[in-house]
Structure formats: structure tokens, C-alpha cells
Amino acid sequence: MRSRDEEARAILRGNDRGGYSVPNGRVYPFQWNWDSAFVALGFATFDGNRAWQEIETLFAAQWADGFVPHIVFWQDDAGYFPGPDRWQAGEGVRTSGITQPPVAASIVRTLWDGDPGVRPRLAALFPKLLAWHRWFWRYRDFEGRGVVVAMHPWETGRDNSPEWDVPGAAIDTAGVAPYVRRDLGHLDAAMRPTGAEYDRYVALVDFGRSTGWDHARIAAENPFRVADVGMSMIFLRANRDLLALAQVLSDDAAADEIAGHIARAEQGIGWLWDDAARSWCSRDTITGRSSGFVTSASFLSFWAGAGDGPRDEAMLAHLDRIGMRVGYLMPSLDPDDPGFQMLRYWRGPVWAVVNYMIGRGLKEAGHVAAGERIRADTNGLIARSGFYEAFDPTGGAPTGGDTFSWTAAIWLAWAR
Ligand code: 9WN
């Protein structure tokens, strides 16, 4: 029998389409933004060149204004909806018109190992990362709050989180032209978002396309504009990591600019603290309402270094409580929430990539035992069930697609 290490490397090789990876060849046959960032970590354990290439290929799809899309359609494949025809976006190569959690700078910092041979590649990537961050400040923090405002649930990477239920209800789906979901041809519907959720996803794609992907107009008029706690924490951390890279490159002007960005994020992040929930939560910028949900993204405060004594204590209390309720941390939704579903995507299942950020963040903040539990649970899930998209936190059963790239990568880079 092959070891899990060998299996993980075989998955990364098997999902390699020549310079970029697909998350899973059948369900997700294109390049995805934050998937590729995490995948690079896995490649780095056995093929350093290929690791850098994964990120470089993603940034080859960057638009002139700095935007980096959430999907890059390097080749056709009818197995996924919505494909390039529905999006009608891209410069040079066809892409989607929304972005995804900006984790790339943090991953590049981890890839950077001080090797002078790699320095030219770092120097070439740095301005692209900075341009993407500037794009975020301009179009995803247009009110200058210091947080990231998501324009689509897919942008958050946590597609059907209950955090989007109330803000999503305002989306008018009446005019959505008929479409055929492809995901249900690959996966059990019980593991996927509902039909009503898909109508909202498609309505937002149709709206963005109707503007010609004018991100200024989208920022002003999109029917869904939610400050996502996950993206905001990831972006705060990414700015800290980008600053470290600016220092490596002795780019003082960029370092000053990024330090200003970090100050803006540190000032703004408190808006996402929900006193009633005693947790970090997403907040609808249109109504000002906090979601009130404790999700796995809430715990990314440790990754961001966003907390303070009392808030960290409150999050650790949630962690202890949830840790006693499930076999495996960190469920994507609080298991004490009535809407918790152990197999339905971002309403319960555990995702290895989120665990990686939470676990590392906890350890860095000095909460070593809690961080180690997250790592050990991730290890236990993959050892038990294999390289699936996500896992049931109660018993560890697999959910979603198999032979999943980012799960394999997190095993190799961190969980094993
Ligand atoms: C839409 C690829 C992506 C991940 C997301 C995950 C899922 C897509 C989908 O798959 O989203 O982007 O069609 O369900 O939610 O986090 O990047 O693995």
C-alpha cells in the first residue's frame, strides 16, 4: 500500500496541468486562486521550482489594474458551471470576474527561504502581489473601513456559509436565465449548496457581467456587499507578510506604503467583532448587521494577529467548547448552531486549508496546545479518510471531491 506521503505527491502530480494545478480534475477542472497558493506549499516539499511556477501561472492571468481572478480558464472543460461563456471576463486568458481570499503573499513568504537563486523570482512576483493588494484596497475596501468587502459568496471561498443567508436574501434572482449545474453530476446534492443559493450565485455573476466587470460600479451597486471576516483576517496577515517581503527586497517605498495599509486594517478590523456572539463575525455593509455566526473563519484572528487579550480569551473559550463537541476541529460552523450540517460544504465540514491557517496562527500567538490539536486533528482526518475536499467534524467521514490538491498539499507541508 502506498503511504499517505506518496499518495499526496501522486495527487499533486496527477492534478498538474502543466504549470498550474486543478483542485480536482472532474469537479473543478480549472485553476483556482487560493487553491493554487496552498498547492504551492505542497509542491515546495519536493519540487521547489514547481511551487513557484504555480503562483507565477496564477499571476499570469492578472489584469492590468491588479485584479487576480478566482478562476483561470486555461483550457475548455464542459464539466463545470459557470464556465467562461457565462463570465465573459479576462485579459489575455479567459477568467472569472471576482477574486478569492488573498493568501498568496503569505504563501510566497513561506516559500521564500532565503535562497539567493530564488530571489529574482521573488523580485518579479512582488510588484504583482503589491498591485493585487492595491486593487483590494481600491475596490474591496471602497468605504475605507480597513476590511475586505466580498461581492460574491464565491469570493470568500466559503460559498454557502450561513453568514451569507441574510445578506443574500436581498439578491433578486427573478431574471436569472436558465442554467444547468454541473457540480451535481459529480457530487451528492446533500454535500453541496442548495438550488436557491445557486440562483443567487448566478444572479451576481450576471450582474457583474452586465457592468462589463467594472469593479468601481460593482463596489457601488452590487446587491451583495459583505465585509467577510475570513478575507479580512487573511488580508491583514497577507499585508504583514508582504511587508516582510518588501524588507527582504530592500524596497523602502513599498514597505512604507504597506505599513500604512497594515495600520488601516488594524484600525478597521474591530468593526468585525460581535459583542453579543463574543466572536469575530462577517458584517453586511449595506445594513450594518453582524452575521452573529461563529465559523472557522472567526478563528483566523490568530493568523491575522488581530486580537487582544480579552478577545483572544473569548475565541479560545469557543475553541474549547467546540473542541468538546466534535471529534475533529475546526468545523466550518459552530456545532451548537441549529443550522450546523456535518456534510454540507461550509455549514459544518472541516477544511484542511483553514485548519492550516488557524493552527499556525494559534501556535505563533503562543497557544501551542490548541494549535497542535488543530494540526493533529487535520492529520487524523486525512489519515482516516484520505485526500478529500472536506470532512465531517463529528466522525471524520469524507465529503466533496476526492484526490483534492490542497488537501494533499496541506498534508505534505504541515499536517503529516
Ligand atoms: C466556486 C475550488 C473551490 C474552492 C472554494 C470552494 C469551492 C467553487 C465551487 O471550490 O468553490 O469557487 O464551485 O463550489 O468553496 O473555496 O476554492 O476548490
Image (cartoon, rainbow, N blue to C red):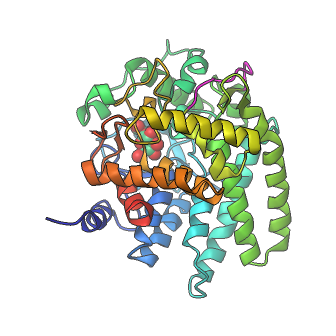
Q: Is residue 209 magenta?
A: no
The residue nearer to you, when weighing 88 against 167, is 167
Taking the image in four quarters, ligand 1 sits in the one at top left
Q: Magenta segment: does it hold 290?
A: yes
Q: Position of residue 380 (x, y in %)?
A: 33, 51
**Above or below, 100 relative to 209:** below
Q: Which residue appears at 57% of the width and 32% of the height?
A: 152
- Indicate the quadrant containing the N terminus: top left, top right, bottom left or bottom right: bottom left
Q: Nearer the viewer, residue 251 or 181?
A: 251
Residue drawn at x 31%, y 47% is: 388
Residue 399 sits above or below residue 203 on the image:
below
The reply to whether residue 84 is in sight is no
- Horizontally, residue 26 falls left or right of residue 377, namely left
Q: Compared with residue 117, is residue 226 higher up or lower down, i.e. above or below?
A: above
Range drawn in magenta: 285-294
263 relative to 224, above or below: below
Q: Where residue 214 sits in the image (x, y, percent)?
A: 67, 38
At a point 47% along the width and 27% down the height, the residue shown is 202
